[in-house]
Amino acid sequence: MAPSAQPVLLYDGVCGLCNRLVQFTLRHDHNDTFHFAALQGPVAARILERHGQSPGDLDTFYVVTGMDQPAEHLLARSDAALYVLRELGGGWSVVAMFGRVLPKALRDALYNAIARNRYRMFGKFDACPLPDPKVRHKFLQ
């Protein structure tokens, strides 16, 4: 599957929590479903601008499906997180199913509370860490 046909996670490359979530996804992505792009990079900027989002807003985790295709779609916040869990399959899809029971406003309020405090709680890197060489092909520039 070409990278543009695979879902791409857009994440804050200097956020400790975001980098842990990327590592979690890599560990559990047994079907090699996802690619990744830091919000600070040109790939994310191009996608976000197409969807009327600010590339400077680092408080949101996104998933883009059908990248560079006519049906390209951007998921944000809790919708993006639940999409990732569903696509990871197994027990994670059950967690996503239960997460969908909560109203979106409540899910996003919880998401936003964590996002506001993520640097304090999980740390911040001076620069985006380089991915392990064996998975570097999954990271879009």
Image (tube, rainbow, N blue to C red):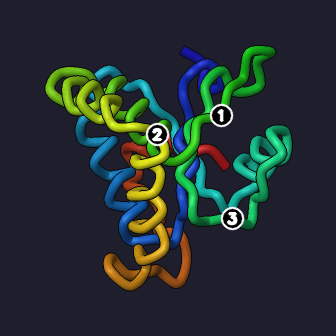
Separation (CA) of disc 2 from disc 3: 20 Å
> Mark 3 vs mark 1: which is more N-terminal?
3
Q: Quadrant of residue 134?
A: top left
Residue 74 shows which numbered tag? 1
72 versus 129 height, above or below: above
For disc 2, the marked residue is 104
Percent across and percent down for residue 130 are 47, 63
Tell me what residue is drawn at x 53 percent, y 42 percent. 9
> Mark 1 vs mark 2: which is more N-terminal?
1
For disc 3, the marked residue is 57
Amino acid identity at mark 1: Leu
Separation (CA) of disc 1 from disc 2: 16 Å
Amino acid identity at mark 3: Asp
Contact, mark 2 vs mark 3 (Cβ under 8 Å): no
**Crowdedness near tag 2: few (<14), some (14–19) or many (≥20) residues, C-alpha within 10 Å:** some
Q: Is residue 81 left or right of residue 67?
A: left
